[in-house]
Image (cartoon, rainbow, N blue to C red):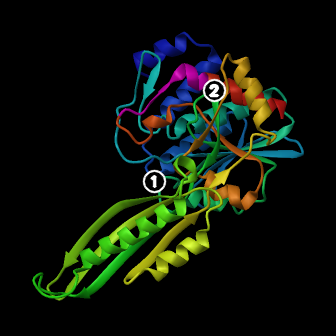
Amino acid sequence: MSSSLHDVIQRMSISDGTAIELLRDLVAIPSTSTNEAGAVAFLVDWMSEHGLNARIDSTGNAIGTIGTGSRHIILLGHIDTVPGEIPVRIEDGVLHGRGSVDAKGPLATFACAAVEAARRDASVRITVVGAVGEEHIGSVGAREVATWPAPNLCIIGEPSGWDAICLGYRGSITATYRVRQESRHTAGPGEASAEKVVAYWNVLVAEVQRRNGDQTGFNALMPAIRDMGTRHDGLTDEAWMHIGLRLPPGVDVPGLIEFMTASSEGELEIHGIQEGVRSGKQIPLVPPFLRAIRAQGGTPRFTVKLGTSDMTVVGPVWRCPILAYGPGDASLDHTPEERIVLAEYLRAIDVLTEVLVSL
């Protein structure tokens, strides 16, 4: 244990020290998408040691269940991170490291709150999931979890800020558009494959603008080029483009796919489709969060996110009350400055514990 971590823990209670150690150790284990096994095994061992019935499922997810009762609450976080090594350290009460915000902070919050709620005899069954593959196309871990019977309630582990709850995420379409043709001289007639790919993109952007009308922000479609390139072997000329489309809830996904396909002179491969999800403020999860945040001295806030999360995987399948919650500043996601304020992490544990007990 580093001296700075030891000093922080000495100033905290035993419960706070345990929570900080869990997060620090979890962040210290690299777990980029498809390489989560070490972190998963660590979390399963920790949950087992703290009273959860814990296991690793066939997809590689960390699963832990605790408590009894007629109501089942799933706390679905993800344990994988994007690439990029950030030295793990604690300075001035702030933990730096890849995944500290997105989303090991929220996941550690889930594990600690589940233990604390069970100790206080919360009359619910709580399942904590550390899902694999959220940062990878397909969200394989959440898709496995979505095959389970729907719970009564679900909370997604993403950084909303300790004093805020997130009610919605946009969905997505991920696709590759590819044009292959016989090689041609650049001075000859016709269009190169790269020009045809660019023309397809321009048509798609114009259609998105038409469909958006006056809509902006969360309620608007947002297209993005994620990667593109060309290849030539002297006989064949090929160009490709990886496309991402962010989808607000309620968008006509079949109609959009039909347009994308009909406008394609080349090959269009759809890799994944996730619907956008937005919950109302009237769902039964909201009042206990508002009370718990106020009890910790906060002023509750509501947010929606422009990106995607596992909420858009399980939400359309389960159709149960669902929202996202977790400590951390989401603007630090995927950045070299990823870090989390430990005091806010501990407040989030207290908030979520009160929510689970009240339910």
- In this view, the residue farthest toward the top is 11
Q: Which residues are magenta?
A: 337-346
Q: Which residue is mark 2?
A: 163
User: Is residue 285 visible in the rendered structure shown here?
Assistant: yes
324 vs 225, left or right, is right
- In this view, the residue farthest toward the front is 214
Gap between marks 1 and 2 measured at Cα: 29 Å
Secondary structure state at the residue bearing disc 1: loop
At label 1, which amino acid type do we have?
Ser
**Vertical position of residue 98 compared to residue 8: above or below:** below
Is residue 136 or residue 330 the one in the foreground?
A: 330
Q: Classify mark 1: residues with Cα within 10 Å, few (<14), some (14-19) or many (20+).
A: some
Specify which label sits upstream in the sequence, 1 or 2.
Answer: 1
| Image x and y of residue 46, in percent | 61, 36
Question: Does the magenta segment cover residue 284?
Answer: no
Label number found at residue 33: 1
Residue shown at the point (36%, 68%) measured from the top left: 202
Question: Does the magenta segment cover residue 340?
Answer: yes
